[in-house]
Image: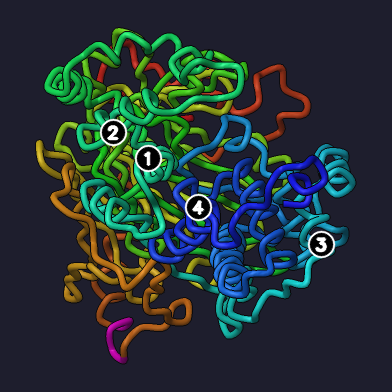
């Protein structure tokens, strides 16, 4: 308005169309959450814009809504922040580098301002990461906005960093948005939005050419101009799609339905985010998080649907080209060529993959693999081992291949129903695309050493059918009393089920519903004893049934690539000469 006055333009009405859109935007976020959730790059831009409204907006309603949005955004950030200040997260939109390195970004300086994490002393970045971290502190725009803002976080926001004061544990689940059809109907009825104003809101949800939105997308582009463009179709970002304006509505819908494996994977609404974190102060911590959606089997653009963290080392699975390091190319944009089904129960998660669609395979590689940086864990003073089932067990079915590790007081296990071979970098590649993985995190409150934890992991068994992945594990692996479990206390076991398709996601009470929290290891009276009796025998013999061998992690003097584990013949391979299972004699990598 000041610029318009100084340049001879008439002033706009105080209750402008823009104010209505801002008000609708803020209310949408408070009802449904942030669609670009936990994005290391994008959320800092959103934070800056919100703080501008908090500090400078004369409209008290808008300023108040913006403050509530900042509370929600920072709660989500701190829920994923490690004690070291590192930031690894499941996300709707992220880059490959954010899955590999958790420091050196604007968001780390924001975390430091709020918590002090990463500013030196215990938990600070090591010497290799320090220059990136210091650069972020000096150059961070978002931190400057926060440091000079009148906004002050409430205690309820800050407790997402440390968890409950009594046990340092955080269990939280929240839903991002509603099914797309409901979101379209809600926005069309919004009185603050006129005409096609709601279409960019749909785009913020990734709903560009979905069945419910493709017609509105084309209508919006037809009706909108931009500086220097006759219409948006002549803009560089839309020119390649300009032929779509000549299709009838029925043809647009037909094309959208037949390309659903490509179009639907971009959706960022109707997502269920679950996180379990154990904050161990100076001894690091563990984190496990998943995203559950109805886009199973679709191409997941920039999506990270599962993330586990041990100390400051990330572990995750992907479907695409294992460990591409270049920052360009389709294999990185499509971080998941086939999005998995997920089900998380506290500190245990099941992640099941189906083969990618034939349409996706025409364009993208589609191997299923895990990123597990054992070399980095070793450099940080940790230890780990790879466990493979004996040949007889593998033929009988149910037993899993495991990679387990310990760092500080934290433990992380990753199991797979398919045989694993080392890939490039710290990757383990599954033998088949149709496979499921099991993630488990725990602490020294539950396990005495790595052998104890490995024994419990080895006692797990599972299988995958056409409709679901099933897992049975000893009760001692489950921290507290997570919801949704089927427990056999006499046998000391717990059963998990991960459906491969979802008619509807679990309902939640708003965008930030918390799950019931209990202290680590605390169970209802008598349950621990009954569970222990049934689990003790199974866990103590399970490790003996595996052919396992702890390996030396002295990568400093080895000419082997860090992350590749030497086998019994000295070669860095888990190859089994074409067999589905390894020989049942001799040590295993």
Q: Which mark is residue 514?
A: none
In this view, the residue in front, 161 or 223, is: 223
- Label 4 crowd (10 A; few <14 / some 14-19 / many >=20): some
Helix, strand or loop status at disc 1: helix
> How far apart are the alpha carbons under marks 1 and 3?
48 Å
In this view, the residue in front, 439 or 568, is: 439
Circles 1 and 3: CB distance less than 8 Å?
no
Tell me which colouring the rendered structure shows. Answer: rainbow
- Label 2 crowd (10 A; few <14 / some 14-19 / many >=20): some
Looking at marks 3 and 4 on the same chain, the residue that comes earlier in the sequence is marked by 4
Residue that carries the numbered disc 1 in the rendered image = 199
Helix, strand or loop status at disc 4: helix
Looking at marks 1 and 2 on the same chain, the residue that comes earlier in the sequence is marked by 1
Query: Mark 4 or 2, which is nearer the eye?
Result: 4
Looking at marks 1 and 4 on the same chain, the residue that comes earlier in the sequence is marked by 4
In this view, the residue in front, 50 or 7, is: 7
Confirm whether residue 355 shows in the render: yes
> How far apart are the alpha carbons under marks 1 and 4?
15 Å
Q: Position of residue 12 (x, y in %)?
A: 62, 52
Please report the bounds of the magenta region as a residue range.
Answer: 525-529
Query: Mark 1 or 3, which is nearer the eye?
Result: 1
Residue at horizontal 33%, vertical 76%?
481
Circles 4 and 2: CB distance less than 8 Å?
no
Looking at marks 2 and 3 on the same chain, the residue that comes earlier in the sequence is marked by 3
Residue that carries the numbered disc 3 in the rendered image = 122
In this view, the residue in front, 513 or 285, is: 513
Residue 507 in the figure: left or right of residue 585: left
Helix, strand or loop status at disc 2: helix
Residue 355 in the figure: left or right of residue 237: left
Residue that carries the numbered disc 2 in the rendered image = 216
């Amino acid at each position: 308005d000041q610029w318009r006055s100084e340049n001879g333009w008439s002033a706009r009405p105080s209750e402008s169309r823009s104010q209505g859109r801002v008000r609708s935007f803020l209310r949408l976020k408070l009802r449904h959450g942030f669609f670009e959730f936990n994005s290391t790059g994008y959320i800092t831009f959103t934070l800056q814009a919100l703080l501008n409204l908090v500090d400078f907006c004369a409209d008290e309603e808008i300023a108040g809504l913006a403050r509530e949005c900042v509370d929600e955004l920072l709660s989500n950030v701190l829920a994923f922040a490690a004690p070291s200040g590192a930031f690894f997260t499941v996300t709707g939109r992220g880059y490959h580098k954010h899955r590999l390195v958790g420091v050196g970004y604007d968001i780390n300086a924001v975390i430091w301002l709020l918590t002090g994490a990463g500013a030196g002393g215990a938990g600070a970045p090591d010497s290799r990461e320090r220059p990136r971290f210091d650069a972020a502190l000096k150059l961070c725009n978002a931190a400057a906005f926060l440091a000079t803002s009148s906004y002050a976080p409430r205690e309820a926001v800050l407790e997402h960093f440390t968890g409950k004061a009594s046990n340092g544990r955080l269990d939280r689940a929240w839903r991002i948005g509603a099914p797309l059809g409901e979101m379209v109907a809600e926005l069309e009825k919004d009185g603050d939005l006129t005409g096609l104003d709601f279409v960019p809101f749909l785009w913020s949800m990734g709903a560009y050419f979905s069945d419910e939105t493709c017609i509105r997308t084309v209508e919006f582009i037809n009706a909108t101009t931009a500086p220097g463009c006759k219409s948006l179709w002549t803009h560089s970002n839309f020119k390649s799609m300009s032929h779509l304006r000549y299709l009838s509505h029925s043809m647009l819908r037909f094309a959208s339905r037949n390309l659903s494996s490509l179009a639907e994977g971009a959706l960022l609404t109707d997502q269920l985010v679950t996180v379990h974190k154990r904050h161990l102060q100076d001894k690091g911590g563990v984190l496990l998080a998943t995203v559950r959606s109805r886009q199973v089997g679709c191409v997941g653009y920039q999506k990270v649907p599962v993330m586990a963290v041990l100390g400051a080392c990330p572990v995750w699975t992907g479907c695409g080209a294992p460990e591409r390091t270049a920052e360009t190319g389709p294999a990185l944009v499509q971080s998941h060529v086939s999005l998995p089904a997920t089900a998380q129960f506290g500190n245990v998660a099941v992640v099941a993959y189906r083969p990618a669609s034939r349409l996706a395979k025409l364009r993208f590689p589609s191997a299923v693999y895990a990123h597990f940086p054992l070399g980095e864990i070793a450099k940080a003073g940790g230890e780990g081992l790879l466990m493979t089932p004996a040949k007889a067990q593998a033929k009988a079915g149910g037993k899993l291949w495991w990679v387990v590790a310990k760092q500080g007081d934290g433990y992380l296990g990753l199991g797979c129903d398919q045989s694993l071979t080392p890939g490039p970098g710290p990757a383990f590649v599954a033998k088949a695309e149709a496979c499921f993985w099991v993630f488990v995190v725990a602490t020294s409150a539950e396990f005495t050493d790595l052998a104890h934890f490995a024994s419990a992991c080895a006692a797990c068994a599972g299988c995958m059918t056409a409709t679901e992945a099933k897992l049975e594990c000893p009760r001692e692996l489950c921290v507290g009393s997570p919801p949704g479990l089927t427990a056999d206390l006499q046998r000391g076991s717990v059963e998990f089920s991960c459906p491969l398709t979802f008619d509807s996601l679990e309902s939640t009470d708003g965008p930030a519903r918390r799950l019931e929290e209990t202290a680590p290891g605390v169970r209802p009276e008598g349950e621990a004893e009954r569970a222990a009796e049934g689990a003790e025998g199974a866990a103590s013999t399970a490790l003996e049934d595996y052919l396992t061998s702890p390996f030396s992690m002295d990568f400093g003097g080895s000419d082997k690539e860090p992350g590749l584990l030497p086998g019994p013949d000295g070669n860095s391979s888990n190859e089994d000469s074409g067999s589905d299972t390894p020989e049942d004699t001799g040590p295993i990598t």
